[in-house]
Image (cartoon, helix red, strand yellow):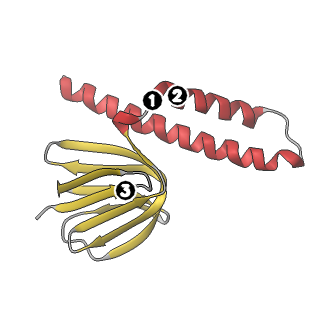
Amino acid sequence: MPLSLNVVTPERTLLAREDVVRITAPATEGQITVLPRHAALMTSLDVGELTVATPEGVIDMAVFGGFLQVSDDHVSVLADAAERADEIDEERAETARRRAEERLAGPRDAAEAVDLLRAQASLRRSLLRLRVRRHRRGARASAER
């Protein structure tokens, strides 16, 4: 019996499927994998890659915090923000990564501490977007061989 999955953000439903074989998610306590007949679970999500295996293939997403609930083979992901790999603009993510690295490399004083935290968060988000997008591109290239 497969899992049903809903991935939602405050803006939209990113994914709704009834044929999910496996879900791997970035829980705050570490990466978890959910299979059919999983015990009931509620956990918070960290920034990371959400991977959904279906009979047709794998769907990769970048998630930026939220919650995951498992109950009776139904999984709900309530994400603060999320993007499917095929929606990520790689050039924009690369530009954000470079900009964050430049801000982190520059001189700092006590007044710039908040800006430093923002730059670190921006770098983490852009690196995740790039990893998810490039992973998807690599998987697609392998399938074409």
Q: Is residue 20 left or right of residue 69?
A: left
Relative to 142, residue 25 above or below:
below
**Residue 46 visible within the image:** no
Q: Nearer the viewer, residue 118 or 120?
A: 118
Please report the residue visible at 40 percent of the width from the left and 61 percent of the height from the top.
Answer: 78
Relative to 37, residue 59 above or below:
above
The residue indicated by pointer 2 is 92
What label sits on residue 73 in the rendered view? none
Which amino acid, mark 2? Arg
* Label 1 crowd bin: few (<14), some (14–19), many (20+), radius 10 Å: few
Residue 142 x %, y %: 24, 28
The answer to whether marks 1 and 2 mark residues whose Cβ atoms lie closer than 8 Å is: yes
Residue 121 x %, y %: 63, 47
Whichever of labels 1 and 3 marks the residue nearer the N terminus, that label is: 3
Cα–Cα gap, marks 3 and 2: 23 Å
Residue 102 x %, y %: 71, 30
Disc 1 is placed on an element classified as: loop
Please report the residue visible at 42 percent of the width from the left and 34 percent of the height from the top.
Answer: 88
Q: Is residue 9 left or right of residue 14?
A: right
Which amino acid, mark 3? Val
The residue indicated by pointer 3 is 8
The answer to whether marks 3 and 2 mark residues whose Cβ atoms lie closer than 8 Å is: no
Cα–Cα gap, marks 1 and 2: 5 Å
* Label 3 crowd bin: few (<14), some (14–19), many (20+), radius 10 Å: some
What label sits on residue 89 in the rendered view? 1
Relative to 36, residue 21 above or below:
above
Relative to 85, residue 91 above or below:
above
Please report the residue visible at 59 percent of the width from the left and 32 percent of the height from the top.
Answer: 96
